Structures are given as structure tokens and as C-alpha cells.
Image: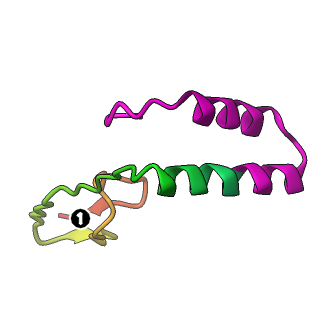
Amino acid sequence: VNYSGYDNHAMQVLLKQLNDSYDTKERIKLVKQIEEMLLSSYSVTYIGFNNLIFATRKGLKNFTPHVTDYYQITVDLELQS
């Protein structure tokens, strides 16, 4: 998702070519061009995070909090009485 509103016609052309190409060497070449264009345009990338708070109770099994997870209810979660 382009939250920053970055708009560059040349970038759009390269991204279209990348999307349309199946040749690995061509795709690598295009990605390098895209990276160079981003770096030279002083584009800003924002990295955000959420504070996660976990509350558990006795008998909760197979719950392992992880810093990158936000959805903890899985098929492995088990509540024992």
C-alpha cells in the first residue's frame, strides 16, 4: 500500500515491466533499477509498530507470543480446564 503517495511515472513503467517479466535475469536487473531509483529520489519509508499486550490464564497451552505476531488465535491454541 502506498500510504506516502509516492508517484513516479518512470517507476511505474519499471514496476509494470517487472510484473510482466518471467525472465529471472531481467527481473533482477529491473529490481536493481527500481532500488537505485528509490535511493536516488530520497524516498522515505516509514516503519511502524504496535504495542502488543498479552494476557493469559492458567491452563492455556501452545501459546507463544512473538514480537511480529498480532493474531495469536491459531489451530494449535488449547484451553484446558
Q: Amino acid at mark 1?
A: Gln
Q: How is the image coloured?
A: rainbow
Rendered image quadrant of residue 78: bottom left
Instruction: Please count the marks in the image.
Output: 1
Above/below status of 55 relative to 11: below
Q: Quadrant of the C terminus?
A: bottom left
Q: Residue at x 51, y 31 (%)?
A: 8
Q: Residue at x 90, y 47 (%)?
A: 23
Name the residue beneath numbered marker 1: 80
Task: Please provide percent x and percent y for residue 20.
Answer: 80, 32
Q: Is residue 25 one of those drawn in magenta?
A: yes
The quarter of the image holding the N terminus is top left
Q: Is 70 on the left or on the right of 31, as rendered?
A: left
Q: Nearer the viewer, residue 68 or 81?
A: 68
Image coordinates for residue 7, horizontal then vertical, percent: 45, 29
For disc 1, the neighbor class at 10 Å (few under 14, some 14 to 19, many from 20) is few
Q: Is residue 54 left or right of residue 7?
A: left
Q: Is residue 68 above or below residue 64?
A: above
For this rendering, which residue is in front, 54 or 68? 68
Q: Nearer the viewer, residue 73 or 78?
A: 73
- Residue 46: x %, y % from top left: 29, 52
Q: Residue at x 30, y 72 (%)?
A: 64
**Going by the picture, which residue comes out furthest to the front?**
40
- Magenta region, mostly helix, strand or loop? helix
Q: Nearer the viewer, residue 46 or 81?
A: 46
Element at label 1: loop
Q: Which residues are magenta?
A: 1-30
Is residue 6 a member of the stretch shown in magenta? yes
**Residue 79 x %, y %:** 24, 61
Vertical relation: 21 (above or below) 44: above
Q: Residue at x 68, y 52 (%)?
A: 33
